[in-house]
Image: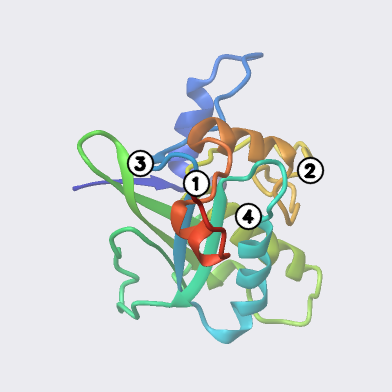
Amino acid sequence: MKLKIAGLLTLLVVALAVPLGAKADHEWMRWGARDRLVLEVGNNMDPRWHPQLEAAVAGWSVTDHGNPVRLKIVPGAGNPDCGIVPGRIEICNWDLGPTGWSGATWAEHDEQGNVTAMRIIINDYYHPDDEQWDRAKNRQWIVCHELGHALGLDHFDEAGVDLDTCMDYSDNIAPNEHDFEQLVAMYGRWRPSWNYWIRIGVAVSK
Ligand SMILES: [Zn+2]
């Protein structure tokens, strides 16, 4: 199994690999899914992060823009080191000290390069639980941002340019329309499964 990390160091490598003026590819890694990307998010975060996780999951699961993504929060596997769970995103938080990154996403993938699992760690060292309420926006940004990586997206911008998406570095708290265009390009437009039609009671006859 191979691991790739979307942390600050690898991000710099990605940035250097993009020629100046070129439109950066917004894809980082791709799950092996088409027509929809339905994933469970194993929640191992402590309760003070739950509002941010719920908001970020809702933000990435909107039903417009043809968005192929639907995320659902489930209890985390509770692995002490936030271990990989096949077919799932696991998200955790703890204080890792001054690592240089406030959140990081690891991808596990198969020989074809298709993502098989993702793991997100938020570093509490950079999100101290103090009275500075402006940090709340930064907390929302980092959860939205790392979840975007876990869906396979790369950065839009790393220089702090405000592109109105949590996939830049300017504290935006939600994805934008272009993020969903990219997800559609990667996974196709949302198309309900047969199970979906059966569940909502649509009968098909010939
Ligand atoms: Zn990032």
Pointer 3 or 4: first along the chain? 3
* Percent x, y of residue 180: 65, 40
| Residue 157 appears in the rendering | no
Nearest to the observer: residue 101 or residue 141: 141
Task: Tell me if label 1 and label 4 are in contact, CB under 8 Å.
Answer: no
Determine whether, in the image, residue 175 is placed left or right of residue 193: right
Residue farthest toward the front in the current orientation of the protein = 206
Q: Secondary structure at mark 1?
A: loop
Which residue matches tag 2?
A: 164
Q: CA distance from mark 1 to mark 4?
A: 13 Å
Nearest to the observer: residue 86 or residue 5: 86
Q: CA distance from mark 3 to mark 2?
A: 28 Å
Q: Quadrant of residue 185?
A: top right
Q: Secondary structure at mark 2?
A: loop
Which residue matches tag 3?
A: 32
Residue type (three-letter) at the residue carrying disc 2: Asp
Pointer 1 or 4: first along the chain? 1
Q: What residue is shown at x 45% (from left), y 42% (from top)?
A: 9
Q: Quadrant of residue 146?
A: bottom right
